[in-house]
Amino acid sequence: MIDFGIAKRLFTSAEARLAAIRAELQQMQARREAVRHAAVSREDLKGLVAVWIAGNCSRFPEQVQQIVGRLATNPHALSKSDELKRLVTFGSGSQFGEDPTDLSQILSALLGPAMLSAVSAAVDSMDSWPETALTAAQREKELTVLDNKIEKLLHEEREIVDRAREAGLNLE
């Protein structure tokens, strides 16, 4: 005689394991999203600002050199009001304040170290910082660990579903 009780217990056990895997998967995926969107650490924020200022600083002299180069090789350009306007506005092509991108390049070039000091002082003076803040290294390490766990759980889930299907059972 066939003992269907054993089959039922095995099926129930497989269902329970699959449910546990899926619950853990949800937790790991939620944790991954939390890590991905976690606040930036103070030091990383200051570093990002420094990179932004440096990038703006490097573009400004290039713009001025291009304009001066055009004027030097084409003296007739001096009579063109557009070229003179670009030179007088330090390459921005607009009056100060009209284009925030160009103005930020000018300010970064002229006041870069002072801007960086001001931002760093503002960041350092903040009384509270999000407790969930992570450095870039911490974020990368934690995402790698979570991605590996998620991949293992997905593999185990697929294996259980496939093996059940091979036995004629539907666990999806």
Image (cartoon, rainbow, N blue to C red):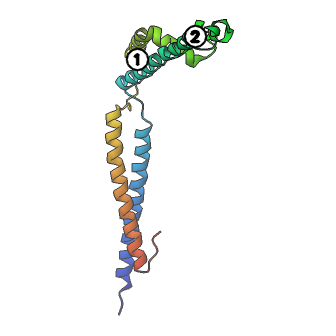
Q: Is residue 86 above or below residue 18?
A: above
Q: Which tag is nearer the camera, tag 2 or tag 1?
A: 2
| Type of the residue with mark 1 | Val
Residue 39, x across and y down, in percent: 42, 31
Front residue (pair 95, 132): 95
| Type of the residue with mark 2 | Leu
Residue 19, x across and y down, in percent: 41, 62
Task: Name the quadrant containing residue 11.
Answer: bottom left
- At x 49%, y 15%, the residue is 60
Side of 9 where 103 appears, left or right: right
Q: Secondary structure at mark 2?
A: helix
Front residue (pair 40, 67): 67
Q: Is residue 87 above or below residue 144?
A: above
Side of 61 where 42 appears, left or right: left
Q: For the residues marked 2 and 1, what is the alpha-carbon distance in whole angstroms? A: 43 Å
- At x 33%, y 45%, the residue is 144
Crowding around mark 2 (Cα neighbors within 10 Å: few <14, some 14 to 19, many 20+) is some
Residue 76, x across and y down, in percent: 64, 9
Residue 13, x across and y down, in percent: 36, 70
Q: Residue furthest bottom?
A: 1
Res 71 label = 2
Res 123 label = 1
Asked whether residue 17 is in view, the answer is yes
